[in-house]
Image (cartoon, grey):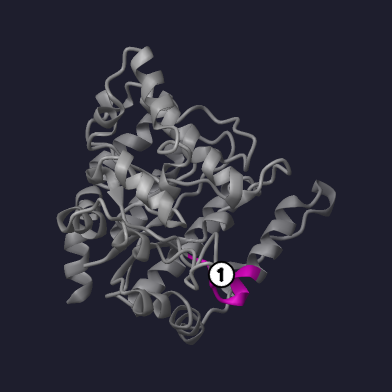
């Protein structure tokens, strides 16, 4: 089974964008001009609209590229935790997560849900526990955790701070992992998908490898997307910093706690990732339809057709590829196997 652990609903029905535009305008209005929030009841998204948006995009690419199942979450750049307050973020997260649940209901053999969290600048992560619990009850198998709700200004405590500990405790209790994923960037110095995403991935790894968070939470599982940011390319730097700080080898620190995905959009990048990072810590992913939607003129193939790169990695054995395509996902998402069986029934 080919399991893509990193997919976002980036082709949502148009009225979702209308609602978010109205919600954002109301949230950003001056106090004297404060507009009423748009009613959730006014959202109009039919099952036919959802089917059309999925079948012409994500489902089409699944079939063409030979993948079977996508672990699916709301549009990452649309989470917008820096917009409005906690109440705005809570409503928006619930709407987006309910939409993912509808996709899964319509295509139970092709998608399994992962939730967006109602994070907001300055608000403790523990306040997101209720939404995580709600989504797990709906059959979701994980969450996307934003290390920077500010949208590019990096003013939240590090992910190793005890500020996060109540949320980690709940993750372990529910047996769900988190993908560390920022949202849209409002800092004009950074491009959302070209620099901000990769900067945040690298930052998270650096925080984690110098911490004792996995001693406190030995069963905590975190996925660092986009191939681990800069880490595989600068493995010697990160490994050396860890050793200089009397920490174990980098592969030992990662252990059963830190995992990278294959959202790396060229063959040399996947070759490097799979040579440097332990195979047991790599999950197959494409993030389609996402950051890079086009076709590579040098190959004639879509940049985000990452299965092609894994298939083409000469140093990987058949057993290695089985781990990357399926086995590791089953390990990292403990609820996945039972949820696949439930949805297949």
Judge whether residue 178 can be spotted in this image: no
Mark 1, other Cα within 10 Å: few <14 / some 14–19 / many ≥20: few
The relative height of residue 110 versus residue 179 in the rendered view (above or below) is below
Residue 13 lies within the magenta run: yes
> Measured from the top left, where is residue 33 in percent x and y?
83, 54
Residue 165 figure quarter: top left
- Please name whichever residue, 172 or 129, is drawn nearer the observer in this view of the structure: 172
Name the spot of residue 187 as percent of width and height, x first.
70, 42
Q: Residue furthest right?
A: 32
Relative placement, left or right, of 237 versus 40 is left
Task: Tell whether 27 sits left or right of 14.
Answer: right
Which image quadrant for residue 51?
bottom left
- Left or right of 39 on screen, residue 212: left
Which one is nearer the viewer's eye here, 4 or 25?
Answer: 4
* Whether residue 322 can be seen here: yes
Quadrant showing the C terminus: bottom left
> What span is in magenta?
9-17
Q: At 43% from the left edge and 25% from the top edge, which residue is drawn? A: 237
Q: How many numbered tags mark residues here? A: 1
Query: What is the x, y in percent for residue 260?
Result: 35, 45
Q: Is residue 279 above or below residue 241?
A: below
Q: Secondary structure at mark 1?
A: loop
Residue beneath label 1, please?
297
Front residue of 303 and 119: 303
Residue at image x 64%, y 47%? 185
């Amino acid at each position: 089974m080919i399991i893509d652990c990193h997919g976002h609903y980036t082709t949502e029905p148009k009225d979702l964008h209308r609602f978010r535009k109205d919600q954002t305008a109301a949230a950003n209005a001056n106090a004297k001009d404060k507009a009423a929030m748009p009613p959730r009841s006014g959202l109009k998204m039919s099952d036919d609209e959802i089917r059309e948006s999925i079948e012409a995009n994500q489902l089409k690419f699944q079939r063409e590229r030979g993948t079977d199942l996508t672990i699916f979450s709301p549009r990452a750049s649309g989470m917008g935790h820096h917009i409005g307050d906690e109440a705005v973020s809570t409503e928006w997260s619930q709407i987006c997560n309910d939409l993912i649940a509808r996709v899964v209901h319509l295509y139970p053999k092709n998608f399994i849900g992962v939730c967006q969290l109602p994070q907001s600048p300055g608000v403790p992560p523990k306040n997101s526990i209720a939404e995580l619990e709600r989504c797990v009850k709906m059959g979701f198998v994980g969450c996307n955790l934003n290390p920077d709700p500010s949208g590019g200004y990096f003013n939240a405590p590090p992910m190793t701070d005890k500020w996060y500990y109540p949320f980690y405790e709940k993750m372990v209790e529910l047996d769900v992992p988190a993908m560390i994923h920022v949202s849209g960037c409002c800092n004009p110095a950074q491009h959302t998908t070209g620099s901000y995403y990769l900067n945040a991935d690298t930052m998270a790894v650096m925080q984690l490898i110098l911490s004792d968070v996995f001693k406190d939470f030995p069963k905590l599982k975190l996925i660092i997307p986009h191939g681990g940011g800069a880490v595989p390319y600068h493995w010697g730097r990160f490994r050396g910093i860890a050793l200089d700080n009397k920490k174990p080898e980098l592969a030992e620190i990662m252990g059963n706690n830190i995992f990278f995905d294959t959202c790396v959009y060229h063959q040399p990048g996947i070759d490097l990732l799979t040579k440097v990072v332990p195979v047991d810590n790599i999950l197959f992913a494409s993030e389609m339809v996402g950051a890079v939607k086009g076709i590579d003129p040098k190959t004639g193939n879509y940049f985000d057709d990452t299965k092609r790169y894994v298939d083409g990695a000469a140093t990987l054995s058949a057993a290695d590829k089985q781990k990357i395509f399926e086995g590791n996902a089953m390990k990292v998402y403990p609820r996945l196997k039972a949820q696949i069986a439930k949805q297949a029934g």
